[in-house]
Image (spheres, rainbow, N blue to C red):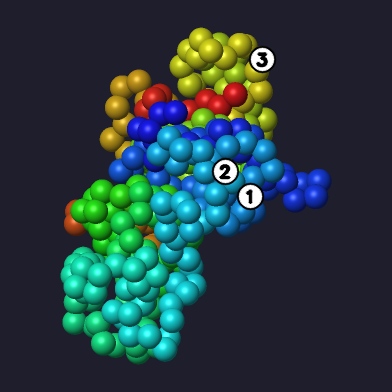
Amino acid sequence: MDASFAVRLDGVSKRFADTYAVHDLNLDIESGRFFSLLGPSGCGKTTTLRMIGGFTDPTEGSVILAGEDVTVLPPDRRNVNTVFQSYALFDHLSVADNVAFGLKRKGVDKTEMRRRVGEMLELVQLDGFAARKPRTLSGGQRQRVALARALVNRPAVLLLDEPLAALDLKLRRQMQVELKQIQREVGITFVFVTHDQDEALTMSDRICVMNEGRVEQVGTPEDVYEHPAGRFVASFMGTSNLMSGTYRGGEVTLDQGPALPVGARTAIADGTAVSVSVRPEKVWLSDFEPGMSVLRGVIRETVYSGPTTTYLIELAPGVTLSVLEQNTARARMEDRWSGGETVEFGWRPEHCLVLA
Protein backbone atom coordinates (compact mmCIF):
# COMPACT_ATOMS: atom_id res chain seq x y z
CA MET A 1 0.00 0.00 0.00
CA ASP A 2 1.11 3.56 -0.81
CA ALA A 3 2.42 5.19 2.39
CA SER A 4 2.82 8.63 0.77
CA PHE A 5 -0.77 9.34 1.73
CA ALA A 6 -1.44 10.01 5.38
CA VAL A 7 -5.08 8.98 4.88
CA ARG A 8 -6.72 6.93 2.16
CA LEU A 9 -10.45 6.15 2.17
CA ASP A 10 -11.26 3.34 -0.25
CA GLY A 11 -14.94 2.98 -1.10
CA VAL A 12 -16.00 4.00 2.41
CA SER A 13 -19.70 4.14 3.22
CA LYS A 14 -21.63 4.56 6.44
CA ARG A 15 -25.27 3.59 6.57
CA PHE A 16 -27.68 4.18 9.44
CA ALA A 17 -30.72 1.92 8.88
CA ASP A 18 -31.69 2.68 5.26
CA THR A 19 -29.96 6.05 5.07
CA TYR A 20 -26.41 6.67 3.88
CA ALA A 21 -24.54 9.33 5.88
CA VAL A 22 -21.50 8.72 3.65
CA HIS A 23 -21.72 6.91 0.33
CA ASP A 24 -18.84 5.27 -1.58
CA LEU A 25 -16.21 7.80 -0.55
CA ASN A 26 -12.79 7.59 -2.21
CA LEU A 27 -10.32 10.11 -0.86
CA ASP A 28 -6.53 10.51 -0.65
CA ILE A 29 -4.96 12.97 1.80
CA GLU A 30 -1.25 13.63 1.31
CA SER A 31 1.11 13.71 4.27
CA GLY A 32 1.88 17.10 5.79
CA ARG A 33 -1.18 18.84 4.33
CA PHE A 34 -3.87 20.95 5.94
CA PHE A 35 -6.93 19.20 4.50
CA SER A 36 -10.47 20.41 5.12
CA LEU A 37 -13.74 18.51 4.88
CA LEU A 38 -16.27 21.21 4.03
CA GLY A 39 -20.01 21.10 3.61
CA PRO A 40 -23.40 21.95 5.08
CA SER A 41 -24.81 20.28 8.19
CA GLY A 42 -25.67 16.65 7.56
CA CYS A 43 -23.37 16.24 4.54
CA GLY A 44 -21.31 13.47 6.19
CA LYS A 45 -18.10 15.35 7.00
CA THR A 46 -18.08 14.62 10.76
CA THR A 47 -19.04 10.98 10.14
CA THR A 48 -16.08 10.75 7.76
CA LEU A 49 -13.76 12.23 10.40
CA ARG A 50 -15.06 9.77 13.00
CA MET A 51 -14.39 6.85 10.67
CA ILE A 52 -10.80 8.03 10.19
CA GLY A 53 -10.39 8.28 13.96
CA GLY A 54 -11.98 4.91 14.67
CA PHE A 55 -14.95 6.28 16.62
CA THR A 56 -17.38 5.07 13.95
CA ASP A 57 -17.06 1.84 11.96
CA PRO A 58 -17.67 2.04 8.21
CA THR A 59 -20.47 -0.10 6.80
CA GLU A 60 -18.35 -0.73 3.71
CA GLY A 61 -14.85 0.09 2.50
CA SER A 62 -11.41 0.54 4.05
CA VAL A 63 -9.65 3.20 6.13
CA ILE A 64 -5.90 3.25 5.47
CA LEU A 65 -3.43 5.35 7.49
CA ALA A 66 0.16 5.69 6.22
CA GLY A 67 -0.25 2.53 4.15
CA GLU A 68 -1.75 0.42 6.95
CA ASP A 69 -5.34 -0.82 6.84
CA VAL A 70 -6.78 0.25 10.22
CA THR A 71 -10.46 -0.30 9.42
CA VAL A 72 -11.00 -2.69 12.35
CA LEU A 73 -8.57 -1.07 14.80
CA PRO A 74 -9.93 0.90 17.80
CA PRO A 75 -9.03 4.60 18.22
CA ASP A 76 -6.22 3.96 20.74
CA ARG A 77 -4.39 1.78 18.22
CA ARG A 78 -4.40 4.38 15.46
CA ASN A 79 -1.67 7.01 15.21
CA VAL A 80 -4.18 9.86 15.28
CA ASN A 81 -5.44 12.35 17.84
CA THR A 82 -8.63 14.40 17.84
CA VAL A 83 -9.51 17.93 18.92
CA PHE A 84 -13.26 18.15 19.55
CA GLN A 85 -15.48 21.21 19.39
CA SER A 86 -16.10 20.91 23.15
CA TYR A 87 -12.31 20.65 23.87
CA ALA A 88 -13.06 17.90 26.49
CA LEU A 89 -10.53 19.26 29.01
CA PHE A 90 -10.25 18.03 32.61
CA ASP A 91 -11.15 21.04 34.76
CA HIS A 92 -9.71 19.50 37.95
CA LEU A 93 -6.24 19.20 36.33
CA SER A 94 -3.78 21.98 35.60
CA VAL A 95 -3.02 23.03 32.04
CA ALA A 96 0.27 21.13 32.17
CA ASP A 97 -1.41 17.97 33.48
CA ASN A 98 -4.07 18.18 30.77
CA VAL A 99 -1.37 18.37 28.10
CA ALA A 100 0.60 15.54 29.74
CA PHE A 101 -2.41 13.23 30.12
CA GLY A 102 -1.71 11.09 27.06
CA LEU A 103 2.01 10.90 27.81
CA LYS A 104 1.32 9.62 31.32
CA ARG A 105 -0.90 6.88 29.94
CA LYS A 106 1.94 5.85 27.62
CA GLY A 107 4.41 5.75 30.53
CA VAL A 108 6.72 8.45 29.14
CA ASP A 109 9.65 9.34 31.42
CA LYS A 110 8.90 12.37 33.67
CA THR A 111 11.87 14.38 32.42
CA GLU A 112 10.91 13.76 28.80
CA MET A 113 7.29 14.52 29.66
CA ARG A 114 8.12 17.91 31.18
CA ARG A 115 10.26 18.78 28.17
CA ARG A 116 7.57 17.88 25.63
CA VAL A 117 4.80 19.60 27.59
CA GLY A 118 6.94 22.73 27.82
CA GLU A 119 7.59 22.66 24.08
CA MET A 120 3.90 22.31 23.30
CA LEU A 121 2.83 25.11 25.64
CA GLU A 122 5.42 27.37 24.05
CA LEU A 123 4.20 26.37 20.58
CA VAL A 124 0.62 27.38 21.41
CA GLN A 125 1.76 30.51 23.28
CA LEU A 126 0.72 29.29 26.75
CA ASP A 127 4.15 28.78 28.33
CA GLY A 128 3.17 30.92 31.32
CA PHE A 129 -0.08 29.06 31.98
CA ALA A 130 1.15 25.61 33.07
CA ALA A 131 -0.23 25.81 36.63
CA ARG A 132 -3.58 27.36 35.68
CA LYS A 133 -6.86 25.40 35.63
CA PRO A 134 -8.82 25.30 32.34
CA ARG A 135 -11.88 26.96 33.92
CA THR A 136 -9.81 30.14 34.47
CA LEU A 137 -8.94 30.43 30.77
CA SER A 138 -10.67 32.15 27.87
CA GLY A 139 -12.23 30.16 25.03
CA GLY A 140 -9.22 30.74 22.79
CA GLN A 141 -6.81 29.64 25.51
CA ARG A 142 -8.82 26.48 26.19
CA GLN A 143 -8.71 25.72 22.50
CA ARG A 144 -4.91 26.05 22.57
CA VAL A 145 -4.69 23.65 25.53
CA ALA A 146 -6.76 21.07 23.63
CA LEU A 147 -4.50 21.49 20.61
CA ALA A 148 -1.32 21.10 22.69
CA ARG A 149 -2.72 17.96 24.36
CA ALA A 150 -3.38 16.41 20.96
CA LEU A 151 -0.04 17.40 19.41
CA VAL A 152 2.17 16.35 22.33
CA ASN A 153 1.60 12.70 21.40
CA ARG A 154 3.13 13.36 17.97
CA PRO A 155 0.34 11.77 15.93
CA ALA A 156 0.73 11.15 12.22
CA VAL A 157 -2.70 12.75 11.68
CA LEU A 158 -4.54 15.33 13.76
CA LEU A 159 -8.33 15.36 13.39
CA LEU A 160 -10.13 18.61 14.20
CA ASP A 161 -13.93 18.61 14.47
CA GLU A 162 -15.00 22.27 14.11
CA PRO A 163 -12.69 23.33 16.99
CA LEU A 164 -13.19 27.07 16.37
CA ALA A 165 -16.99 27.06 16.20
CA ALA A 166 -17.50 28.26 19.80
CA LEU A 167 -15.21 31.30 19.45
CA ASP A 168 -16.34 34.81 18.56
CA LEU A 169 -15.64 36.06 15.05
CA LYS A 170 -12.52 38.12 15.79
CA LEU A 171 -10.89 35.38 17.88
CA ARG A 172 -11.86 32.73 15.35
CA ARG A 173 -10.08 34.62 12.58
CA GLN A 174 -7.01 35.03 14.76
CA MET A 175 -6.99 31.32 15.60
CA GLN A 176 -7.35 30.38 11.93
CA VAL A 177 -4.02 32.03 11.17
CA GLU A 178 -2.35 30.61 14.28
CA LEU A 179 -3.61 27.09 13.62
CA LYS A 180 -2.24 27.15 10.08
CA GLN A 181 1.11 28.44 11.34
CA ILE A 182 1.25 25.65 13.94
CA GLN A 183 0.46 23.04 11.28
CA ARG A 184 3.31 24.26 9.10
CA GLU A 185 5.71 24.29 12.05
CA VAL A 186 4.95 20.75 13.26
CA GLY A 187 4.47 19.29 9.76
CA ILE A 188 1.66 16.98 10.87
CA THR A 189 -1.28 16.20 8.59
CA PHE A 190 -4.35 18.11 9.79
CA VAL A 191 -7.83 16.93 8.77
CA PHE A 192 -10.20 19.76 9.61
CA VAL A 193 -14.02 19.65 9.58
CA THR A 194 -15.90 22.90 9.04
CA HIS A 195 -19.10 24.25 7.52
CA ASP A 196 -17.51 27.72 7.17
CA GLN A 197 -16.37 28.39 3.59
CA ASP A 198 -14.17 31.36 4.54
CA GLU A 199 -12.47 29.26 7.23
CA ALA A 200 -11.68 26.48 4.76
CA LEU A 201 -10.39 28.91 2.13
CA THR A 202 -8.17 30.67 4.69
CA MET A 203 -6.55 27.61 6.23
CA SER A 204 -6.48 24.73 3.76
CA ASP A 205 -3.94 23.34 1.33
CA ARG A 206 -6.76 21.25 -0.16
CA ILE A 207 -10.52 21.19 0.34
CA CYS A 208 -13.01 18.38 -0.07
CA VAL A 209 -16.52 19.78 -0.62
CA MET A 210 -19.18 17.29 0.47
CA ASN A 211 -22.93 17.19 -0.05
CA GLU A 212 -25.42 14.52 0.97
CA GLY A 213 -22.70 12.03 1.83
CA ARG A 214 -20.79 12.37 -1.43
CA VAL A 215 -17.76 14.28 -2.67
CA GLU A 216 -18.65 17.18 -4.96
CA GLN A 217 -15.10 18.41 -5.58
CA VAL A 218 -11.56 18.10 -4.20
CA GLY A 219 -8.93 20.72 -4.96
CA THR A 220 -6.96 23.71 -3.77
CA PRO A 221 -8.90 26.64 -2.32
CA GLU A 222 -8.39 28.51 -5.60
CA ASP A 223 -9.64 25.52 -7.62
CA VAL A 224 -12.91 25.09 -5.77
CA TYR A 225 -13.64 28.83 -5.61
CA GLU A 226 -12.57 29.91 -9.11
CA HIS A 227 -13.45 26.69 -10.96
CA PRO A 228 -16.39 25.00 -9.19
CA ALA A 229 -17.23 21.56 -10.57
CA GLY A 230 -20.98 22.17 -10.47
CA ARG A 231 -23.88 24.29 -9.35
CA PHE A 232 -23.72 23.12 -5.71
CA VAL A 233 -20.05 24.07 -5.27
CA ALA A 234 -20.54 27.38 -7.06
CA SER A 235 -23.41 28.31 -4.74
CA PHE A 236 -21.88 26.91 -1.55
CA MET A 237 -18.40 28.42 -1.93
CA GLY A 238 -19.11 32.04 -1.12
CA THR A 239 -21.61 34.17 -3.03
CA SER A 240 -22.26 33.54 -6.71
CA ASN A 241 -24.71 34.92 -9.23
CA LEU A 242 -26.34 31.74 -10.52
CA MET A 243 -28.74 31.91 -13.45
CA SER A 244 -30.41 29.08 -15.36
CA GLY A 245 -30.75 28.99 -19.12
CA THR A 246 -30.04 27.16 -22.36
CA TYR A 247 -26.71 27.17 -24.19
CA ARG A 248 -26.66 27.77 -27.92
CA GLY A 249 -23.99 29.18 -30.21
CA GLY A 250 -21.81 30.89 -27.62
CA GLU A 251 -24.75 32.37 -25.71
CA VAL A 252 -26.89 31.32 -22.78
CA THR A 253 -30.50 32.43 -23.07
CA LEU A 254 -31.77 32.79 -19.54
CA ASP A 255 -35.02 31.12 -18.47
CA GLN A 256 -36.03 34.57 -17.29
CA GLY A 257 -34.19 37.31 -19.11
CA PRO A 258 -31.90 38.04 -22.05
CA ALA A 259 -29.16 36.07 -23.76
CA LEU A 260 -25.70 36.32 -22.17
CA PRO A 261 -22.59 36.04 -24.37
CA VAL A 262 -20.38 33.36 -22.83
CA GLY A 263 -18.09 32.38 -25.70
CA ALA A 264 -17.80 29.04 -27.51
CA ARG A 265 -17.97 26.03 -25.17
CA THR A 266 -16.94 22.98 -27.20
CA ALA A 267 -17.77 20.60 -24.34
CA ILE A 268 -21.41 21.76 -24.23
CA ALA A 269 -23.86 20.84 -27.00
CA ASP A 270 -26.35 23.38 -28.31
CA GLY A 271 -29.69 23.10 -26.53
CA THR A 272 -28.15 21.96 -23.22
CA ALA A 273 -29.75 23.27 -20.02
CA VAL A 274 -27.02 25.00 -18.02
CA SER A 275 -26.32 27.30 -15.12
CA VAL A 276 -24.29 30.48 -15.51
CA SER A 277 -22.15 31.58 -12.55
CA VAL A 278 -20.46 34.96 -12.07
CA ARG A 279 -18.90 35.96 -8.75
CA PRO A 280 -20.04 39.40 -7.44
CA GLU A 281 -16.46 40.68 -7.20
CA LYS A 282 -15.87 39.81 -10.88
CA VAL A 283 -18.56 42.21 -12.10
CA TRP A 284 -17.45 45.68 -13.26
CA LEU A 285 -19.53 48.84 -13.00
CA SER A 286 -17.23 51.12 -15.00
CA ASP A 287 -14.05 51.32 -17.14
CA PHE A 288 -15.08 48.38 -19.33
CA GLU A 289 -12.43 46.63 -21.42
CA PRO A 290 -12.78 45.52 -25.06
CA GLY A 291 -14.37 42.09 -25.32
CA MET A 292 -16.28 42.30 -22.06
CA SER A 293 -19.94 41.32 -21.79
CA VAL A 294 -21.76 44.58 -20.96
CA LEU A 295 -25.40 44.62 -19.87
CA ARG A 296 -27.87 47.10 -18.38
CA GLY A 297 -29.94 46.84 -15.22
CA VAL A 298 -31.60 48.78 -12.44
CA ILE A 299 -30.09 49.10 -8.95
CA ARG A 300 -32.67 47.86 -6.47
CA GLU A 301 -30.65 47.83 -3.24
CA THR A 302 -27.37 49.17 -1.86
CA VAL A 303 -25.73 47.44 1.10
CA TYR A 304 -22.78 49.20 2.77
CA SER A 305 -20.51 46.83 4.73
CA GLY A 306 -17.49 48.94 5.67
CA PRO A 307 -14.72 47.75 3.32
CA THR A 308 -17.21 46.93 0.56
CA THR A 309 -20.54 47.98 -0.91
CA THR A 310 -22.89 45.44 -2.50
CA TYR A 311 -25.33 46.49 -5.21
CA LEU A 312 -28.33 44.33 -6.10
CA ILE A 313 -29.06 44.94 -9.78
CA GLU A 314 -32.20 43.75 -11.54
CA LEU A 315 -31.23 42.43 -14.95
CA ALA A 316 -34.75 41.33 -15.83
CA PRO A 317 -37.94 40.60 -13.88
CA GLY A 318 -37.03 37.87 -11.43
CA VAL A 319 -33.28 38.04 -12.23
CA THR A 320 -31.19 40.01 -9.72
CA LEU A 321 -27.40 40.07 -9.65
CA SER A 322 -25.15 40.91 -6.72
CA VAL A 323 -22.18 43.19 -7.47
CA LEU A 324 -19.40 43.77 -4.94
CA GLU A 325 -17.23 46.89 -5.02
CA GLN A 326 -14.29 47.73 -2.75
CA ASN A 327 -14.56 51.02 -0.86
CA THR A 328 -11.05 52.16 -1.72
CA ALA A 329 -9.30 55.32 -0.59
CA ARG A 330 -10.32 56.99 -3.84
CA ALA A 331 -14.00 56.00 -3.56
CA ARG A 332 -16.33 58.77 -2.40
CA MET A 333 -19.64 58.40 -0.61
CA GLU A 334 -21.33 60.69 -3.13
CA ASP A 335 -20.22 58.40 -6.00
CA ARG A 336 -22.26 55.48 -4.66
CA TRP A 337 -25.67 54.72 -6.10
CA SER A 338 -28.60 54.78 -3.72
CA GLY A 339 -31.12 52.79 -5.77
CA GLY A 340 -33.37 53.18 -8.77
CA GLU A 341 -30.61 54.14 -11.22
CA THR A 342 -30.14 52.33 -14.52
CA VAL A 343 -26.50 51.28 -14.85
CA GLU A 344 -24.24 49.33 -17.14
CA PHE A 345 -22.26 46.40 -15.78
CA GLY A 346 -20.11 43.70 -17.27
CA TRP A 347 -17.52 40.97 -16.84
CA ARG A 348 -14.68 39.30 -18.64
CA PRO A 349 -15.71 36.18 -20.59
CA GLU A 350 -13.38 33.95 -18.56
CA HIS A 351 -15.15 34.97 -15.34
CA CYS A 352 -18.49 33.67 -16.62
CA LEU A 353 -18.66 29.96 -15.78
CA VAL A 354 -21.07 27.71 -17.65
CA LEU A 355 -22.07 24.68 -15.58
CA ALA A 356 -23.82 21.90 -17.45
- Horizontal placement of 65 versus 11: left or right? left
- The location of residue 71, given as percent across then percent down, is 57, 43
Residue 313 x %, y %: 50, 46
- Dot 3 amino acid type: Gly
* Residue 175 shows up from this direction: no
Location of mark 2 (residue): 71
Q: Which residue is mark 1?
A: 57
Amino acid carrying mark 2 in the image: Thr
Instruction: Give the quarter of the image for residue 355.
Output: top right
Considering the numbered disc 2 on the image, is that residue within a helix, a strand or a loop?
loop
Q: Tags 2 and 1 in contact by the CB under 8 Å rule? A: yes
In this rendering, the label closer to the viewer, 1 or 3:
1
Query: Which residue appears farthest toward the right when viewing the image?
Result: 18
In the image, residue 323 lies at what x, y percent? 43, 46
In this view, 179 is above or below 255: below
Query: Within 10 angstroms of label 3, few (less than 14), some, or many (20 or more) residues?
Result: few
Q: Which of the pair 290/352 is nearer the observer?
A: 352
Residue at x-position 59% and y-position 46%: 72
Q: CA distance from mark 2 to mark 3?
A: 47 Å
Closer to us: 97 or 340:
97
User: How many other residues sit within 10 Å of disc 2, few (<14), some (14-19) or many (≥20)?
Assistant: many
Marks 2 & 3, CB-CB < 8 Å contact: no
Is residue 100 something one can see in this rendering? yes
Q: Which residue is mark 3?
A: 271
Residue 190 percent coordinates (x, y): 37, 51
Tell me the mark number nearer the camera, choosing from 2 and 3. 2
